[in-house]
Amino acid sequence: MGRVTGSIRTAGCERLQYDYAPGLVPEEEPGSFTMWRYRSLLPISDGPVRYPLPIGGTPLLPAPALRAGLGTPSLWVKDETRGPTASNKDRATALVIEDGLRRGLETITTASTGNAAVATAFGAAAAGMRAVIFVSVDCQEDKLALMTQAGAWVFQVPDGYAAAVDLSRAAVEEFGWVDRNTGVNPLTTEAKKTVALEVWEQLGRRMPDVMVAPVGDGPTLVALEKGFAELVACGLAARTPRLVGVQAQACQPLVRAWLGADPRPDELAPGSTVADGIAVLRPAIGDAVLRAVRSGDGAMVAVSDSELMEAVGLLASTAGVGAEPAGAASVAGLRSALRDGLVDLDETIAVLVTGREIKAAGSPTRARVAVAERLDDVRQALRAPEA
Ligand SMILES: *Cc1c(COP(=O)(O)O)cnc(C)c1O
């Protein structure tokens, strides 16, 4: 197969020729390795999945040059940048929307300034739902452009991110919208646990010894623990891996809590790290993170911005994987854990690369962006003719 029999020149262009026959094109179903493969372990009833974008089934890469560089022969990169909006937020978004569609709901909301907001806007667009997103006033133009291009309504909340969360949740109560707020809706953790099930399958139905993941609000790591524990509960595996959670030095509330030490002010400064995706001052499910790390005999580590940027470069130059700083944090965290003897070089290690920044084409649609302080402002803006 794949045998070239010659080549011809047509219009100044060389075309390779094969020994053409029907058997050269495979007859099996095209690959459909998606998150829904694990639907027996997801809280949705039978019936066809309506969510239209492909979710999950991301590659587990051997990354030989990265292995050689770090001296870790059994390292694997779980590349979560391959989803529709290039971060692991796509999984949670998909399950929350699928559940909303089944309940006949038409609007989804979340507060976020980052990848969850973009994932929600695009996922809702694909599913024919309305997305209403609450952000703080300092949300980047690029993110606003992505959200409004996908048709989302965006409300800027002057009192900051915590107030945006409050307003989004109040809208859920008042209007009966679907709640995509991270750590609040248990479906977000259920969806993200499928990463653990995939890693186990991709390793030939074997557990890694260690899995390293970035920690912001916490669902990513807590979901890994749940996914691995459920494989044990199913009788498919004998033990769970150690989990290493990674935070940025400039915002490391859970690393300090893990060490039992009080954080200094410069360790609680979310605005001053390049890893905005994990710069969370008050993690939504921080206690659950500490419990998950402890239960598997894992650890929490903090990495500096320069270590994060080195990890971004290392992933690009040795694995061909593009990542944003928060997305590359597990590689930086692994190097730190190797130095500190928390992980041995010859263990089977999986690092979770959670996301890559996507670039907007053009600027935000202003008619879809408004300031809101109270639910009345939201009600009024959505009553306007274009809404
Ligand atoms: C959200 C996010 C994280 C952190 O995930 P949590 O589940 O909030 O802990 C890490 N990396 C990227 C790229 C993210 O978008």
Image: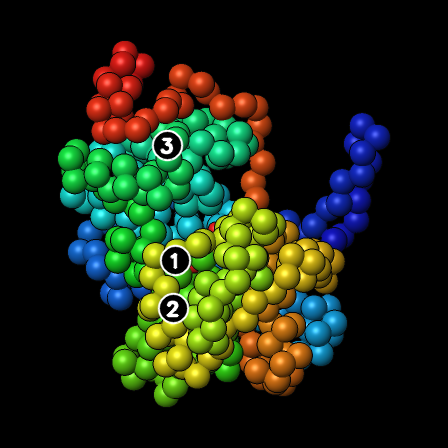
On screen, residue 229 above or below 164: below
Name which residue lies at 49% across and 34% down: 138
Q: Is mark 1 within 8 Å of ligand 1?
A: yes
Earlier sequence position, callout 2 versus callout 3: 3
Q: What's the CA distance linking mark 3 and mark 1?
A: 20 Å
Question: Which dot marks residue 289?
Answer: 2
On screen, residue 58 above or below 175: below
Q: Is the Cβ of the residue at disc 2 closer than 8 Å to that at disc 1?
A: yes
- State which mark lies toward you, 2 or 3: 3
**Residue indicated by mark 3:** 157
Q: Is mark 2 within 8 Å of ligand 1?
A: yes
Badge 1, how many Cα within 10 Å: few under 14, some, many 20+?
A: many
| Residue 146 position in % (x across, y down) | 49, 32
| SS under mark 2 | helix
User: What kind of residue is marked 2?
Assistant: Val
Badge 3, how many Cα within 10 Å: few under 14, some, many 20+?
A: many
Earlier sequence position, callout 3 versus callout 1: 3
